[in-house]
Image (spheres, helix red, strand yellow):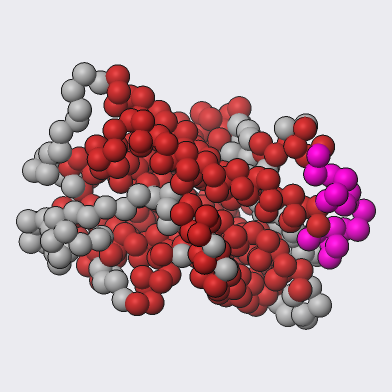
Amino acid sequence: MTDLEFASRQPSKNPGFTAVAGGARLAFVDNLRWVMIVFVVSMHAAVTYSHLGSWYFMEDPKPGQAMTAVFATYQVFLQAFFMGFLFLIAGYFVPGAFDRKGLARFLRDRAIRLGIPTLLFMLTIQPVTVYWLLRVFADPDRTPLARAYWPYLSSGRFLSGSGPMWFTFALLGFSLVYGLVRRLRRTPPGDQPDAPLPTHRQVVGLALVMGLCGFLVRIVQPMGTSVLNMQLCFFSQYILLFVVGVRAWHRDWLLRLPYRFGMRWFTLALTWGSLGWLAFIVTVSLTHREPEVGGGLTWPSAVLSFWEAFFCLGVCLGLTVWFREKFNRRSRLTGWLSDHSFSVYFIHTPILVAITLALRPFAAPKPVKFLLATLLGASLSYLVAALILRRIPVLKRVL
């Protein structure tokens, strides 16, 4: 995935985990990366059938209350951590890239690897999906591509047409800020491989800060709103985890974090997080406060913001140590999945939309169609990435 600049790390001296071969790629991070990308495809497939969230095509009719609750649980649990985790991983490798390249080359490479794919999506994938694919197979009243394309450009609407590539657009901005901060600092931050590890108190403190920031932002930018296709209601989490990733590089946290520490938080997130979510949705339903969950100066918005923060950190800590211990190998298959994951992220939008449009005549329960769309969407996106996109020399450099 070219937007995340991976590097090697020497094995940690911490006896609490299986060491990585000296100088090798961090295989467990590669595996985390492609799993998160599959989750992205899965999330968009879920929106298609749940009508919860925003996506290009959502199949009617809307599901009933019970099915909506099932989809909502899956989507809320996933949204709580998966994109934030990608920002943490991205932040982890930014300092090493900057140290090797310096400011000018660092920003130039980021512009190529992040900016070009984002612009390419805005100028090609987005308009083709909206003004051709959806028009021909779903909504013939849409303006045809030939007549819509110039107004799409001249009006500036293309700036909000990043689709899922808002992630790379935001990461480009984060990288720019990081580069400028590094340039303004008189002395570069040194590596501290023996620095103290995070404590339970610090994790709780970070969760409280993250939850409070999320709640405050949602007073003015509730869920469902966006600026240039970026949902600012989640950005306090993304910014904080990007900073955590940067700090983790200098202190070698991903390799030194004790397995028991991470798994304890993982267990707490899955158990108490699940019980807390159940109590929350029951209370909200009984008090008829559903419209207040997404934002505003309301207790449902506050509770959800803090729940997301604690669940996010617990899952990120747990998955980090779990993959490091159990999935720290690069096989031919996992290497292939990792190498093509960014291309899948880039191209999955029109492929998933086409698949869900084709599945409309298929009479099956929505959960079945969701699982089928996820499987087909991820599989076909990987095939297109490997057999087409990555075989084009110009695209191979940025995808």
Camera sees residue 206: no
Most extreme residue toward the front is: 393
Seen from the viewer's position, the closer of residues 247 and 122 is 122
- Going by the picture, which residue comes out furthest to the bottom? 363
Residue at (88% x, 45% y) in the render: 147
In the picture shown, does residue 355 fall above or below 144? below
Picture quadrant where residue 26 is located: bottom left
**Lateral position of residue 52 relative to residue 107, left or right:** right
Q: To which quarter of the image does residue 338 belong?
A: bottom left
Task: Find residue 334 and report its horizontal and vertical position in percent.
Answer: 37, 72
Query: Tag count in the figure?
Result: 0
Give the magenta range.
133-150
Is 72 displayed left or right of 264 in the figure? Answer: right
Residue extending farthest to the right is 141
Q: Is 127 a magenta residue?
A: no
In the image, residue 184 sits, relative to residue 169, either above or below, namely above
Q: Residue at x 25, y 61 (%)?
A: 25
Q: Position of residue 140 (x, y in %)?
A: 91, 58
Nearest to the observer: residue 97 or residue 58: 97
Q: Main secondary structure of the magenta part?
A: helix
323 lies left or right of 230: left
Q: Nearer the viewer, residue 165 or 294?
A: 165
Residue at the image position 25 percent from the left and 40 percent from the top: 100
Q: Identify the residue shown where x is 70% and y is 63%.
A: 353
Relative image position of residue 171 (x, y in whole percent): 46, 40
- Quadrant the N terminus occupies: bottom left
**Left or right: 58 as drawn, with respect to 270:** right
Q: Nearer the viewer, residue 332 or 73?
A: 332
Q: Would you place residue 209 above or below residue 396 in this image?
A: above
Image spot of residue 251 (x, y percent): 17, 42
Asked if the magenta segment contains residue 148, the reply would be yes
- On the question of residue 61 being in view, the answer is yes
